[in-house]
């Protein structure tokens, strides 16, 4: 019969590269590591590790088993933390992830609502790839996520993403830019501009921008890459380039910037709440409802023009 020590040994061998090093990492003797490995190989009736003069490497069967072993060990780690939270706080902790712009505006009022109801929440901020990884590993139970209108998120069938808000993508120009006099700016009018883009080639906002520019017959030329929207706006104001920015990321009005809509079909990113399809807790459902209420308030606020910043 398998136990967790067998899986821990397989993972340690994969990480450390030898049975002796795996034993040191686990604080086991080498005979103990060999015994656990032999039990694991007997269970699957195939060699899982190839031993050589230079160490040990996983066989094809061992490599196939490794992600399952890691998933089991990760889930046990999560369970340990959940039970410890239950003992310490008297209730399970809701582990919530958010990307920065949603963490600044959407999430805090919703968290305050749940805190007042006595719900304990552990918060993690990160960029989208880290949030998706946290959901898959069950390190997170709920996460605010975003995607392009034409593209979903690779979370599999275990998760459902509840739509929350369409976040308009707006052009950010220097206040004295020739196109700033327009209420809506055609992308083609910015063909010769340098663009400030995100750090990752897979940035969802940049993907929307590149597709929209391709429809106009050109490709944006990057002059700077950053995931910090404050840095982005500072360099736009300095005339280094122009940018496409989610409305959630704009922050306070700046006199040195012009924020304009794209002339043509509205460009947006879709913000949602990802939760497990089955077994979602009452606390997760309560957070979803609080986030929906906050999204409604935000949409209402966006519908009220602000003359000082051109309606944004």
Image: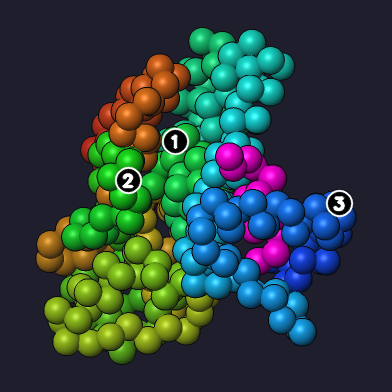
Which stretch did the figure color magenta?
1-14
Residue drawn 86% across the image and 51% down it: 27
Mark before the other along the chain sequence, 1 or 2 = 1
Q: CA distance from mark 1 to mark 2?
A: 13 Å
Is residue 301 among what the camera can see? Answer: no
Q: Nearer the viewer, mark 2 or mark 3?
A: 3
Q: Which residue is mark 3?
A: 27
Helix, strand or loop under label 1:
strand
Q: CA distance from mark 2 to mark 3?
A: 46 Å
Q: Is residue 42 above or below residue 115?
A: below
Helix, strand or loop under label 2:
strand
User: Does residue 82 appear to the left or right of 257 in the view shown?
Assistant: right
Residue 271's tag is: 2
Q: Is residue 13 magenta?
A: yes
Is residue 13 among what the camera can see? Answer: yes
Q: CA distance from mark 3 to mark 1?
A: 35 Å
Mark 3: few, some, or many residues within 10 Å (few <14, many ≥20)? few
User: Does residue 301 appear to the left or right of 287 in the view shown?
Assistant: left
Mark before the other along the chain sequence, 2 or 3 = 3
Residue drawn 28% across the image and 45% down it: 157
């Amino acid at each position: 019969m398998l136990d967790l020590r067998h899986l821990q040994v397989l993972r340690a061998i994969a990480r450390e590269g030898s049975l002796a090093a795996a034993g040191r990492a686990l604080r086991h003797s080498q005979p103990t590591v060999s015994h656990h490995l032999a039990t694991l190989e007997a269970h699957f009736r195939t060699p899982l590790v190839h031993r050589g003069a230079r160490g040990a490497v996983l066989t094809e069967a061992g490599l196939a088993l490794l992600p399952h072993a890691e998933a089991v060990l990760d889930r046990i780690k999560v369970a340990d933390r959940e039970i410890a939270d239950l003992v310490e706080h008297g209730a399970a902790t809701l582990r919530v992830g958010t990307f920065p712009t949603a963490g600044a505006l959407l999430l805090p009022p919703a968290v305050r609502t749940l805190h007042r109801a006595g719900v304990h929440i552990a918060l993690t901020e990160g960029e989208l790839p880290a949030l998706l990884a946290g959901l898959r590993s069950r390190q997170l139970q709920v996460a605010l996520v975003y995607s392009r209108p034409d593209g979903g998120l690779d979370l599999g069938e275990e998760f459902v993403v509840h739509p929350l808000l369409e976040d308009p993508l707006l052009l950010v120009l220097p206040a004295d830019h020739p196109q700033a006099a327009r209420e809506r700016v055609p992308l083609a009018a910015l063909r010769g501009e340098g663009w400030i883009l995100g750090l990752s080639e897979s940035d969802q906002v940049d993907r929307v921008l590149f597709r929209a520019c391709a429809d106009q017959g050109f490709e944006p030329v990057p002059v700077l890459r950053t995931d910090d929207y404050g840095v982005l706006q500072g360099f736009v104001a300095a005339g280094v380039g122009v940018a496409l920015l989610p409305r959630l990321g704009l922050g306070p009005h700046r006199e040195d910037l012009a924020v304009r809509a794209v002339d043509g079909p509205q460009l947006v990113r879709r913000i949602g709440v990802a939760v497990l399809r089955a077994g979602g807790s009452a606390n997760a459902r309560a957070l979803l409802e609080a986030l929906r209420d906050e999204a409604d308030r935000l949409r209402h606020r966006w519908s009220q023009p602000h003359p000082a910043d051109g309606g944004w």
